[in-house]
Image (tube, coloured by chain):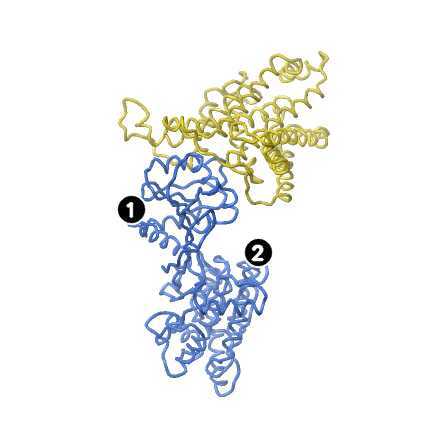
Chain colours: A yellow, B blue
Amino acid sequence: MVLDLLASGLVYSSIIVLGSIGLSLVYSIANFANFAHGDTMTVGAYAALVTFGAVGGLGGTVLGLPYGFFLALGVGIGMAALVAVVTEKVIYEGMDIGSIGLLITSIGIAFIYRAIIQMGFGADFTRYDIPAMRPIDALVTYGIRVTLQDVAIVASATVLVVGLHLLLQYTDLGRKMRAMADNPDLARVSGIRTDRVKLWTWIIGAGLAGAGGVFLGLFSRLTPRMGFDLLLIIFAAVILGGIGSVYGAMLGGVLIGMTTQLTPVLSELGTVLPLVPDTWGIPIGIEYANAIAFVIMVAVLLVRPSGIAGEAV
Amino acid sequence: MKLTGGVGAAGLTGLAGCSATNDSGSGDSGSSGPYEIGMVDAVTGSLSAFGQRNQRGKDLALAAVNEVGVSGQDLNIIVEDSGSESSGGVSAAQKLVNQDGVPFMIGTVGSGVSLSIYESVVQGTDVVQLSQNSTGLGLTDFPGLLRMSPTGRTQSTALANIIADDGYDTVALTYVNNNYGSSLADAFVNAWDGDIAYNNPHDQDQSSYSGVISEMNSSEADAWLFITYQAEFATMVNEIFSSGYEPQLYGADSVSGDNVIENTPDGSMEGMKIAVPSAPVEQENYQNFVSTFESEYDESPTVWSAYAYDCVITAALSIQAAEEFSGAALGEVVRDVTRPEGEEVTSYQAAHDILADGGGPSDVDYQGVSGPIDLNENGDPVGFLQIQEVQDHSYEQIGFIES
C-alpha cells in the first residue's frame, strides 16, 4: 500500500509543483501573493476542456492521452498566460496600493475569474471526454496502481519543470529574472528592462498554473472551484519551500503533495517501520490530511523561518 | 427563558384561536359552511419549485375531497406563503393559527422552517402540524410535528437491509464530513448487524480521494457504501476504476445522477445499488394520480406533489373521523387513519365511505399516492424507497423497499 500511495503522491505532487512554481515566481518578481493563482489554474483547465471538445482526439494517443489533449494542454497554458497578462496590464500594473492592497485585489480577481467560468459552464462538475484507463499490469504485481495517464502527468510536469530550470540557469531571460528577483532596483539600473522581464514572469508563472489546472482536471474533475480549493495547499508548499524561491517551491510542492497522500500510512505505521509492533500507528483519519500538511509546514517554519530553500532574513 | 416565555404566549393565543373556531364550528354544524384548515407553503423563495408542486398536489386532492365531501361539508384550505424562510413561515403560521383559528395546519417544505413554525407557534397548543416535504432527521425528535415525507434515516436502514440481503457481512463505509453525511452514517451503523471494516468521513471538494479508496481497499471488505455527493462520488469511482478495484458498490440517493453517469467510465459502477426515496410508481392509485396530474397540468408530477396530495387527504379523513372539529380531536385520530389494523384503502372516496358508515379511525388504513404513510408515534411515515441498480451504465429500477 505504501508504494501505491507514494505513486499517487507523485502524481498529486506534480500538479501542486506546477501551481506552486508559478505562485512563487510571481511573488518574487511582482512582490505580492497572488490569490487569483488558483483560479488561473481553473482558466487553463476549462480552456483545455473547450479546445479538446472542439478538436477531439486527432487520431493517435501517447501514454493513454489523445494527440488532441496535448493540443488542448497547449491552449490551456496559453489561455492562462493570456488571462494573467491582461489582468496584470489592465489591473495590477496601474494599481499603486502596495502588496497588501494587491493581495486583496487579487482575491477579488479570483472571484471574477470563477464567476465568469461559472456563467459559461455552470457550477456542476465535468471531466474531459477521455476514456479512463486501468492500472498498468506490470506495476500491479508490486502493489502500485497507476495508469498510463498518471505517468503522462508526471512526465509532462517533469518536462515543464526541467524546461524552466534550463531557462532560469542558461538563458539571458533567466539570468535577468534571477537578477530582478534578487534586487529589482539594482537590476533596473544595470540596464535590464524590468517591465519586460515582469511580463515574461507572469507568462511563465500563469502558463505553468494553466498546465497544473489541465492536469488537475484530468486527475480528478473540473469544477469552477477546483483551483481555489487547491490554493491553500499550494500556498503551504510555497511557504514551506521558502516564498520567492522557485526551487523551494518545487521541493515544497513534493513534500506537501506526498504528505497529504501518505496520510493513510500514519494509522498503520507499525506495518511499515521496523522495530515497532505491527499494530502500532497514529490513529488519525484521512480527513485531516490537509491539516497534517500544515502542521508540517508550521514545524518547518519554526526551525527555518524563511522556509527550506529561503534565504536567511 | 425568554424564548420559552414567547412560546407559551403563542400557545395561549393559539388555544384561544382554537376555541373560537370550536364555537363557530358548533354553531355552523347545521349549515354547510366549509371546514377551514391552513397550509404554509414555500410559494416563493429558494424552495418555490417544491412549493409550486405542492400547490398542484393540494389542488388535485382538494378536488377529490370536495367531490365526496367531509362530514357533508366542503373543505377549504387557506394557503399562506413562507417565502422559504423561517421568519416568513412563522408569521404565516401565526396568521393561520391566531387569526384564522385553524386546528390543522399543513406545513411546510424546508426542515428548518417546519421546525421553527413548530417551536414558536404550534408547540404547546392542540393544533396539528403536518409537514408536506421536510426530510431532516431532527424532526423525528419532535413527536408533535408530523410529516408526510420520510426521514433521510429510512435510506440508511434500507441500505443495511439491501447489503445484508446480498449476502455481505462486512462493509466499508465512507461519508461526507457534514451533518447530512454523519447522521446518515450513524443511522446506518445502528441498523447494520454485520462488521464495519472501515468507517471514515472525507471532506467535500477535495482534489484527490485516492487515500480513501486505498484505505477502503485495504479494509478488505467486498461491499463499499458511499454517503456523499455526486462530484465527490464520481471522482472516487474514477479512482476505483483506475486502481483496478472491483468492489460491490452501494450508495445513498445523493450519489446518483446523470452527471455521475456521464463522468464515469462505462462499466465502472456495474451492479451498484442505490436506495432512492420514491412514490410507489407501480401502484394503481399513484398511476391514477399521475394521469390526472398530467391531464391537468401537462407535465408529470414528482413525489413532492404526491406528499402534498396525501397531506390534504389525511387532513380530510381526520376531520371525518374526529368527534369534533378541534385540534385535540384531530390530533387523536390523524395517525390512526393512515396506519394498519384498519382496512387498506387507496382513495379518499373509499376511506370516507368506511368512516361515514360508522367506522372509527382505526378501521381505516389510508394508502397514499406517496406510499403507505403509516404515521408512527414520532410523527414519521414509513419510508418508501426505490432500489436502483446500475446496469449497462444507467440506473434501472429493480424493486421497492419499505422501512
User: In this rendering, does residue B137 appear at all?
Assistant: no
Image: B233 above or below A44: below
Which chain does the numbered disc 1 sit on? B
Whole-percent x and y of residue A79? 65, 31
Camera-near label (1 vs 2) is 1
Which chain does the numbered disc 2 sit on? B
| Residue annotated with mark 1 | B169
Which numbered tag is attached to residue B46?
2
Q: CA distance from mark 1 to mark 2?
A: 42 Å
User: Quick one: label 1 or label 2, which is nearer the N terminus?
Assistant: 2
Whole-percent x and y of residue B105? 48, 69
Res B201 → quadrant? top left
Image: B19 above or below B217: below
- Left or right of residue B195, residue B151 in this image: right
Viewer-closest of A133 and A270: A133
Res B278 → quadrant? bottom left
Whole-percent x and y of residue B121? 48, 65
Q: Are marks 1 and 2 in contact (CB under 8 Å)?
A: no
**Which residue: 52% across, 18% down?**
A309
Which numbered tag is attached to residue B395?
none
Disc 1 packing (10 Å; few <14; some 14–19; many ≥20): some
Image: A252 above or below B201: above
Quadrant in which the C terminus of chain A is drawn: top right
**How many marks are shown on the rendered structure?**
2
Disc 2 packing (10 Å; few <14; some 14–19; many ≥20): few
Whole-percent x and y of residue B306? 49, 65
- Left or right of residue B241, residue A65 in this image: right
* Amino acid of disc 1: Asp
User: In this rendering, does residue A95 appear at all?
Assistant: yes
Secondary-structure class at tag 2 = loop
